[in-house]
Image (cartoon, rainbow, N blue to C red):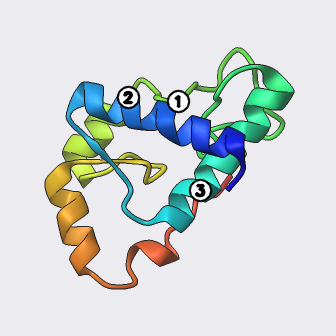
Amino acid sequence: MTERQAEIIEYLKKVADRFGYVLNPDARTLNLVAGYMDENKVKHGKYFCPCKQHYPLDLVKDPVCPCSSFKDEILRNGHCECHVFFDPDAAAKARRAEGLLAAVTCPG
């Protein structure tokens, strides 16, 4: 993990704390998404959501993380679409489902 990825994960942790969520307990997936967010920050100046962005990135339409729908996604699925933010209960269940989170990757 790079220093910038660690900074992004710290940012994501602050967002999670603010809303009563937790981060994905699978470090591999979390680092992968943070890496894509880092690329977007370096190239475009913002933490554009790598899982919901267009290709090429649309600086006007593409959402910045956290996106406007992440709370609804967590209510519906227990986690946001990118598998970054989790409801604490859903994260606990995911930890018990060995290997489940290791297979989840952002399509970005």
Q: Name which of mark 3 and mark 2 comes first in the sequence.
A: 2
Q: Badge 3 local density, few (<14 within 10 Å), some, or many (20+)? A: some
Pointer 1 residue: 65
Task: Give the total number of marks visible in the rendering.
Answer: 3
Question: Residue 2: x percent and y percent?
Answer: 72, 50
Farthest residue to the top: give it. 60
Residue 101: percent from the left, percent from the top? 41, 72
Judge from the rendering whether residue 83 lies leftward or rightward of residue 2; answer left or right: left
Foreground residue among 50 and 36: 36
Are circles 3 and 2 on residues that touch, CB within 8 Å?
Answer: no
Give the residue type that dot 2 points to. Answer: Val
Disc 2: which residue: 15
Check disc 1 and give the amino acid type.
Answer: Cys
Disc number for residue 101 = none
Circles 1, 2 touching at the beta carbon (< 8 Å): yes
Which of pointers 1 and 2 indicates the residue nearer the eye? Answer: 2
Q: Are marks 3 and 1 in contact (CB under 8 Å)?
A: no
Residue labelled with disc 3:
31
Asked if residue 49 can be seen in this view, the reply is yes
Q: Position of residue 63 (x, y in %)?
A: 58, 26
Q: Earlier in the sequence, mark 3 or mark 1?
A: 3
